[in-house]
Amino acid sequence: MRVDLVRYNSQDDYTDGMIFVNGDFICYTIEDEHRTKKVWGETRIPNGTYKVSLRKEGGFHNRYKNKFDFHKGMLCIYNQDNWVLENDGIRFQYILIHIGNTDENTAGCVLVGSVAHMDKNFIGDSTKAYRKLYPIIANALEEGEEVIINVTTN
């Protein structure tokens, strides 16, 4: 399965984007801003191609397991062992796709929403978008399908 995260609005404090699965639009995204040197909680992941798998441990996993009856593990983006994502000399760990509304709700993770408010650092109906996106990816992973996310900036 191919997931595309296409960033279309990069501002000083946040980045707007859209997620497509196998070419079909699924939801909007919001992330931290672009930086060439990582600042914890204020830097988005670099453009690139990464794996997505289910991370079945940690605080987010435990909270989401209690919140969503369909939860099988957090959607985690990585390209090295131990959930590490490293690209362009910037290293992240535990980059998740989860709910939230502004860049203040993320520390490098990708937040999803059903409604985008361009130039306002806000996406809405995040839980609705998560409920739409999560089963598509989680079910593919559970069936043994490899899921790749391609992150680009227009």
Image (cartoon, rainbow, N blue to C red):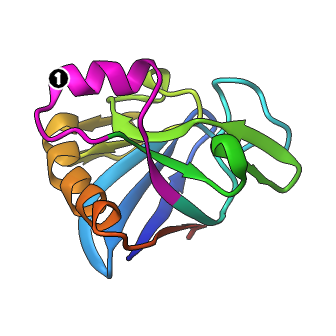
Q: Residue 51, position in %: x, y?
A: 56, 62
Give the residue displayed 82% in from the left and 45% down from the top. Answer: 90
- State the image coordinates of residue 46 (x, y, percent, origin top left): 70, 54
Residue ID for mark 1: 67
Where residue 138 sits, quadrant-wise, is bottom left
Residue for point 24% across, 26% down:
65
- Write the residue at 29% across / 60% down: 142
Comparing 100 with 16, the one in front is: 100
Q: Position of residue 121 (x, y in %)?
A: 41, 34
Q: Is residue 24 above or below residue 35?
A: below
Q: Which quadrant of the figure has residue 4?
A: bottom left
100 relative to 30 in the view: left or right: left
How would you rate the neighbour count of disc 1 (Cα within 10 Å): few for under 14, some for 14-19, many for 20 or more? few
Please name whichever residue, 122 or 143, is drawn nearer the observer in this view of the structure.
Answer: 143
Secondary structure of the residue carrying tag 1 is: helix
**Extent of the magenta region:** 52-72
Taking the magenta stretch, the answer to whether it contains residue 140 is no
Q: Where's the N terminus, which quadrant?
A: bottom left
Question: Can you say whether 31 is above or below 142 in the image?
Answer: above
Q: Residue at x 43, y 56 (%)?
A: 17
Residue 54 is left or right of residue 113, and the answer is right
Q: x, y percentage for residue 10? A: 57, 50
The type of residue carrying mark 1 is Lys
Q: Quadrant of residue 74?
A: top left
- Assign the C terminus to one quadrant of the image: bottom right
Is residue 58 one of those drawn in magenta? yes
